[in-house]
Structure formats: structure tokens, C-alpha cells
Amino acid sequence: MIRILVNDGIHPKGQYLLEQAGFEVDTTSIPQEELADKLNAYDAILVRSATKVRKELIDAAPNLKLIGRGGVGLDNIDVEYARERGIEVINTPAASSNSVAELVFAHLLSSIRFLNKTNRQMADTEFGRFKELKKESSKGQELFGKTLGVIGFGRIGRETARIAIGAGMNVVAHDPYLESADVELKFHPAFNMASVKVPVPMISKEELLAQSDFISLHIPGGGEAVIGEREIGLMKKGAVLVNCARGGVVDEKAMSHALAEGHLSAVGLDVFETEPPVNMDFFTRDDVSLSPHIGAATSEAQERIGEELAQKITAFFN
């Protein structure tokens, strides 16, 4: 029987589908430092972000035939090395797109309506301070009519653009692998309307930084920061930056400095250079909206991820 180790969890529906297909599913979470001694007892391992599947671990498990990632990025897996060893590597690139894109807008709206600040300060305020807080928070912005720059125009970038267009925003994008792109706007079946394709201008990163009121990142990690001091300097004064992609794609020191200087009016962060984050400045600032790497953490996304993993695993082993 094929044995599958689900080390970072899976939706019950995904586990059910795997077991119905005849696989033995072990949902025991084995600590990273113990995996090298135990992984060879399994034919496949499924991970999310927490577990790292590096060369050394792959070498310690010659029986391993498949590595699955519940999510988009594969930067916690040595993909090329695994494939050189004949190991299948799969992920679920489409399953979490909507959930991540919606979180982008949660951070955007929190930032431009000062919800991070007001939520913290209203809890222990008297009526006099309430009036002051209301006055301090009465200079918010609307998204309508503003420009959103999307860096990285894959599935999540396109989904982010789709929501932005629906909110009445102008959207520009940069992706070094694309010369042109469009977004398909889909309507609820109750409206009985056909989908509409809307072209999105593809421009240089420098043009995007200079034109955008809000910037959302949707790029893979694992390399040098894509947004550093130079790039932040090209942004509009008062721009808002959101990173729900990967930690490390933004230079956090440069971002903190830009906030302190007022060049950035706010940032929204779901991912960090190190997790848990060590830049404690973010925890005390009213102009920073934070979440603990939960882009794909909705029940709908996790169910879709579980289903997609089960389908791909079943297809591979059959």
C-alpha cells in the first residue's frame, strides 16, 4: 500500500479522497529534525510552508516518489534536485488564488481607513479620546479611481487585478515573462451574464512604481529582495505597499525607514523575512497592517487544495 505522510495538515475532504483511493494517509506531524530518520517509510510527503524538503532530506529517503505542496510557491522544496532523482513534485497553483487576493484587499482597506489603529485604540478609550480618534481617522481614502500596480501577474496577481477592476480601480501590471495580459471578469450565475475580458497594461517595473497609488506583490521568493531602497524611492509619496507573496521579496529595513520618513503611508504584510518576524517595529506602528501568513488559510481554499492534491496524487500513482 502507498503510504503518504501529511506533515503540515490537509483538509478532511482531501484526506477522505486519498483514503477512498486506497492510500494510507498518516497525518502525524513529524518535527523537521526527525524527518531524515523517518521519511523513508513513506512513498510521498505533503507539506505547506512549515516543512522544508531540501537535498539532504531527499537523499535520506530513497523510497520517496512524490513531494506535494499545498499551495503555490515551491521555495521550501529543492524542486530541481528532487526531479533529478526521479521524484514527482506537485503543487496547487490555482486553489488559493481568490483567498490570497481577498487578503490583499483586507490589508489595503485596513490601511487606508486606519482600522489597525482604531481597532487597537478604541478598546480602552473614554469618550473624549473617542472624538480625537475619530478626527485623526477622518482622512481616509477610497479605492475607486486609484491605481493599483500588480508586480507578478500569475494566477494570484490576476485575481487581485480582477477584484481591483470590480472596485473601480485602474490596474497596471509588471511581469518580466509577459508582454500582454488580460483579466477575465466572471459574474454570479444569477446575473446570467457572459464573462468579460479586460486588458491590463503591462509596463516596466519603474513605470509601475511611479504611477501606482497602491502596489501588491505576487512574486516567488528565494532570491534577493525585489523591492529595496531604490524601488521604494521611485514610488509615489504616500503609496501603500502590500506583500502577501513571500517573505524576503521586500527589504524590511528599507520599508521601515520609508514608513518612518513618511514616504510610504502604510504597508500590509502577511509574510516576513523570517517567521515569526523579528522586526518588532512593525508591531508598534499604526501604519502597518499585519497577518500571520494566512493568505491561503480559508476553509474554501483549503478544501480546494485538498481536492487538487488528492486528484494529482491519485493520477500519479495510478
Image: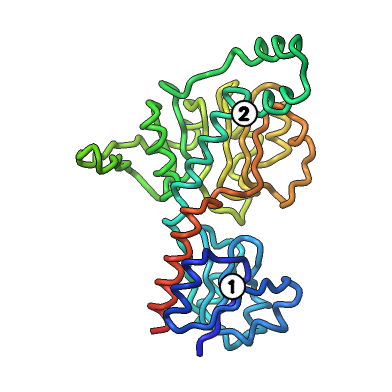
Eye-nearest disc, 2 or 1: 1
Residue lying furthest bottom in this view?
1
Which of the marked residues, 2 or 1, is nearer the chain's N terminus? 1
Callout 1, which amino acid? Answer: Val
Spot occupied by residue 256 in the image (x, y as percentages of width and height): 72, 33
Q: Position of residue 130 (x, y in %)?
A: 71, 14
Residue sitting nearer the eye, 68 or 150: 68
- Residue drawn at x 60%, y 40% is 227
Relative to 129, does residue 68 appear above or below in the rendering? below
**The disc labelled 2 sits on which kind of residue?**
Gly
**As rendered, which of 188 and 104 lies closer to the eye?**
188
Q: Secondary structure at mark 2?
A: helix
Residue marked by disc 2? 233
Q: Is residue 83 above or below residue 51?
A: below
Percent coordinates x, y for residue 184 in the rendering: 30, 42
Q: Which residue is mark 1?
A: 6
